[in-house]
Amino acid sequence: MSDVSTPYDPPAGPIPTIYRDDHLLVVDKPHGLLSVPGRGAHLADCLLSRLAADHPEVLLCHRLDRDTSGIMIFALTKEAQRKTGRLFETKRVKKRYIARVAGLVAEPSGTIDLPLIVDWPNRPLQHVNFETGKPSVTDWQRMGHEGDTTRMRLMPRTGRSHQLRVHMQSLGHPILGDPFYSVDHADWPRMMLHAEGLKFEHPIEGHMMRLEAPCPF
C-alpha cells in the first residue's frame, strides 16, 4: 500500500546522515520521498534504495509516510535490524514529532486515545473505529500560535499508519498541507509534519541514544 495520492516527483540531493556506527545508520529523510519502493517502476525511487547505493548492507527498521520528513533508523546488520525492530514492537523507542496544524489549539496539552483501522473503500486512508480499530494513543503539547495556526509537539505511544494525521484531524486541527486529511493542503508547500527526535537504547551496545533532526519549517 502506497502513500502516493499525487504524481510522484521525489526530491533530489544527498540524504543527510545523523549518526552511523557498525550497526546503525540514522538519517534525515526529506519530505516527498517514499521510505520503501511503491508498486510499479515509477515508484522505485525511495530512501531505502538511495541508501543502498552507498551502503549495500542497509536494512529497514521502520517507516515514515512519503510526505513526512525527519529521523529514520536503518540497520547495517541482521542482528541490529532484529533487535531494533523489537524495540519498536515493545514501544521502547520514544518518538517526538513537530507539526503545524490549522486553527488555534486552546489547551496546552492533552492525550488522544482513538482506535484506528484502514478505511478499506478509501485506502490508504485510515479512520477511527471503536469496534475494530487498533489501540492508538498520542500525547501532544501546544508549542505556540503562529498566525491562525498552531505549532505542536506530538509524542505517539503507538505507531499506527497515519496515526498523527488522523488524530490531529479528530482534534479539529488537521496538519497543514496534509493531502489526505486537510481541506487546504494545496495552500502549503508540503505536509507540515516532521519526525524531530528519537530516544532508544542502542540495540547492540546498550547505551541510551538521543538523536534529533532539526525541524525545517
Image: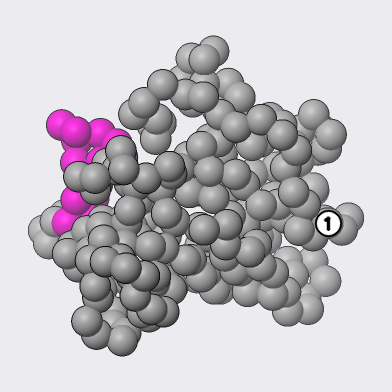
Instruction: Give the residue drawn at x 72%, y 34%.
Output: 13
Please provide percent x and percent y for residue 14: 75, 38
Residue appearing at x 62%, y 47% in the figure:
29
Instruction: Give the colour scheme of this rendering.
Output: one colour
- Whether residue 127 appears in magenta in the rendering, the answer is yes
Locate residue 130: give its quadrant.
bottom left
Residue named by callout 1: 20
Whole-percent x and y of residue 48?
Answer: 66, 36
- Asked whether 182 falls inside the magenta stretch, the response is no
- Quarter of the view holding residue 86: bottom right
Q: Is residue 47 visible?
A: yes
Magenta segment: 116-128
Residue depicted at 43% across the width and 44% down the height: 190
Considering every residue shown, the one lying at the far right of the view is 22
Asked whether residue 157 appears in the rendered view, the answer is no
Residue at far front of view:
147
Closer to the camera, 135 or 122?
Answer: 122
Q: Left or right of 204: which side holds 60?
A: left
